[in-house]
């Protein structure tokens, strides 16, 4: 599916009058779109979590070394 097909499928959701209507339309989207969307969301969230974990680990390790050096 190209960008034009995606825009055509998403147009009713984006132009819905209320949140509940948009939610209902989003849920009724073609499974191809939702499946790709969920896989992408899972991949991005997993990557973000891993990067966040590594960053927090490095920061904590650096803090421990700095505190040990000051004592």
Image (cartoon, rainbow, N blue to C red):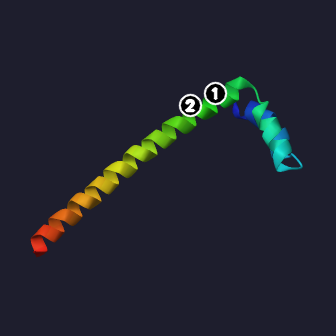
Please report the residue visible at 81 percent of the width from the left and 34 percent of the height from the top: 8
Q: Residues within 10 Å of mark 1 (few under 14, many from 20)?
A: few
Q: Position of residue 42 (x, y in %)?
A: 53, 36
> Residue 35, how many percent across, how many down?
64, 27
Q: Can the viewer see residue 4?
A: no
**44 with respect to 56 (left or right):** right
Q: Looking at the rendering, in which quadrant would you find the N terminus?
A: top right
Q: Position of residue 23 (x, y in %)?
A: 79, 41
Residue at image location 63% in from the left, 34% down from the top: 37
What residue would you read off at disc 2? 39
Which of the labelled discs sits on residue 35, or is there none? 1
- Residue appearing at x 17%, y 70% in the figure: 67
Tag 2–tag 1 contact (CB < 8 Å) = yes
Residue located 82% across and 43% down the image? 22
Pick whichever, 8 or 61, lies toward us.
Answer: 61
How far across and down, in percent of the image, does residue 16 sit?
Answer: 87, 46
Instruction: Tell me: 18 left or right of 31.
Output: right
Q: Give the SS element for disc 1.
A: helix
The residue tagged with tag 2: helix, strand or loop? helix
Compute the Cα span from label 2 to label 1.
6 Å
């Amino acid at each position: 599916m190209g960008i034009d097909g995606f825009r055509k499928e998403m147009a009713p959701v984006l132009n819905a009058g209320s949140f509940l209507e948009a939610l209902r339309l989003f849920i009724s989207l073609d499974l191809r779109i939702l499946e790709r969307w969920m896989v992408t969301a899972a991949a991005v969230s997993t990557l973000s979590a891993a990067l966040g974990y590594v960053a927090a680990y490095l920061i904590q390790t650096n803090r421990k070394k700095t505190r040990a050096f000051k004592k």
